[in-house]
Amino acid sequence: GIAPCLARLTEIGADTLSLDRRLADAPLVARIAGAGLAVALWTVNAESDMRGWRDQPVSLLITDRPETALRVRAEAAPD
């Protein structure tokens, strides 16, 4: 399971865990964030994926489509 990995990351002072988006799902991301680590996902290029992760505890999306990511982020910004 992931518990020993999260414990080790915390032990060594890691502050972020970066994952291939194909390995991530909402429960895993929530568990990582719940352990006090920031979550970075790569490479998120589909606009639908960007929207799907927008309301999750993801600190960083790495993408080849920054214009799309900025637009998706702006859509979520409060007026």
Image: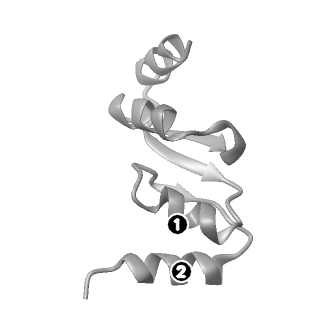
User: Judging from the image, what secondary structure is the residue with disc 1 in?
Assistant: helix
User: Judging from the image, what secondary structure is the residue with disc 2 in?
Assistant: helix
Q: Position of residue 46 (x, y in %)?
A: 69, 67
- Closer to the camera: disc 1 or disc 2? 1
How far apart are the alpha carbons under marks 1 and 2?
Answer: 11 Å
Query: Residue at horizontal 68%, vertical 66%?
Result: 63
Residue 32, quarter of the rendered image: top left
Quarter of the image with the N terminus in it: top right
Query: Residue at horizontal 41%, vertical 30%?
Result: 31
Q: Amino acid at mark 1?
A: Arg
As drawn, the residue found furthest toward the bottom would be 79
Q: Which mark is residue 76?
A: none
Q: Estimate how packed mark 1 is, as few (under 14), some (14 to 19) or many (20 or more) residues with alpha carbons within 10 Å.
A: some
Left or right: 49 as drawn, with respect to 65: left
Residue 11, quarter of the rendered image: top left
Quarter of the image with the C terminus in it: bottom left
Query: Residue at horizontal 70%, vertical 75%?
Result: 65
Residue position marked by numbered label 2 in the rendering: 70
Q: Position of residue 57 (x, y in %)?
A: 39, 49
Front residue of 5 and 46: 46
As drawn, the residue found furthest toward the left would be 79
Residue 54 drawn above or below residue 10: below
Residue position marked by numbered label 1 in the rendering: 51
Question: What scheme was used to colour the molecule?
Answer: one colour
Q: Amino acid at mark 2?
A: Leu
Q: Position of residue 8 (x, y in %)?
A: 49, 16
The answer to whether the residue labelled 1 contacts the one labelled 2, judged by CB atoms less than 8 Å apart, is no
Front residue of 4 and 48: 48
Q: Estimate how packed mark 2 is, as few (under 14), some (14 to 19) or many (20 or more) residues with alpha carbons within 10 Å.
A: few
Numbered marks: total:
2
Left or right: 33 as drawn, with respect to 26: left
Mark closer to the chain start, 1 or 2: 1
